[in-house]
Every structure is written in C-alpha cells, then in structure tokens.
Image (cartoon, helix red, strand yellow):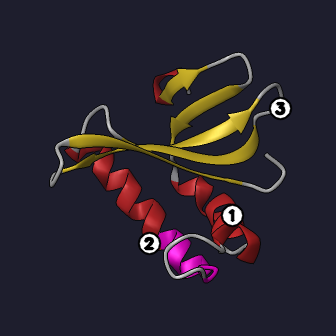
Amino acid sequence: MAENIFLETERLILRRFSIDDVDHIAALDGDPEVMRYVADGLPKTRRDAEEGVARVLLNYEKFPGLGIWIAEEKPHLAFAGWFALKYIPKTEEIELEYRLMKSA
C-alpha cells in the first residue's frame, strides 16, 4: 500500500483511490449536509459515486502528480474525505479542492 500513499502527515494519510472506495464516496456525496454548497446542492447517488471513482482512477495516469486522494485519519485509517490538486487550463493554475465527512 505504501506505493499508493501520496502524502502522510502526523494526523492523515492521503492515498490513491481504489475501486473499494465507492462505499465511502457514496456515503460522503450522499449526505445532504455535505453536499449543500457543492455544485447543485443535491446529494449524489451510488451510481454517481461509482462513475466518479472510475474517472479518478483513469486520471492518475493522464495527469501524474495531480488528482484526488482519499484522506484517512490515523491511527485507525478512518475515512475522512478527499483532497484534490487539479490543473485549471484557463488560468494555468493548480486548484486545491476537498470534501470531508461531517465527523472530520
């Protein structure tokens, strides 16, 4: 698993997504409170989570060093959400995004 770790801090591990993360993303994006200020403000479906995880996995190869990473809280590696670094072509800047569980 160490090869999948992008960043490790005292409190968090950021690692690559895997297909096993669909349940985590479905729970996060399905929470109306979490999604309240995201896009259209509506919770997403499990199907949305499946499609989103599939896109994330493809983009690791397309954009090395950029992407979205699962955030796990130490010491038990509890799912906390995700963090992203995305290239914005219009501005040629890198954007930081994140989405966290209410508990985080």
Q: In this view, does 43 lie above or below 53?
A: below
Residue wearing tag 1: 28
Q: Are marks 1 and 3 in contact (CB under 8 Å)?
A: no
Q: Is residue 16 left or right of residue 46?
A: left
Range of the magenta residues?
A: 42-50
Q: Is residue 83 above or below residue 43?
A: above
Q: Where is residue 84 shown, x and y percent of the image?
A: 45, 44
Q: Are marks 1 and 2 in contact (CB under 8 Å)?
A: no
Q: Is mark 1 on a helix, strand or loop?
A: helix
Tell me the quarter of the image containing the N terminus. Answer: top right
Q: Quadrant of residue 54?
A: bottom left
Q: What element carries label 3?
A: loop
Q: Is residue 96 left or right of residue 72?
A: left
- Residue at horizontal 49%, vertical 75%? 39
Q: Where is residue 8 shown, x and y percent of the image?
A: 59, 20
| Badge number at residue 99 | none
Residue wearing tag 2: 51
Q: How crowded is mark 3: few (under 14 residues within 10 Å), some or many (20 or more)?
A: few
Residue wearing tag 3: 76
> First in sequence: mark 1 or mark 2?
1
Q: Is residue 68 visible in the rendered structure shown here?
A: no
Nearer the observer, 35 or 54: 35
How far apart are the two marked residues, 1 and 3, measured between alpha carbons? 18 Å
Q: Where is residue 31 shown, x and y percent of the image?
A: 73, 72
Q: Are marks 3 and 2 in contact (CB under 8 Å)?
A: no
Q: Where is residue 61 shown, x and y percent of the image?
A: 25, 43
Amino acid at pointer 1? Leu
Amino acid at pointer 3? His
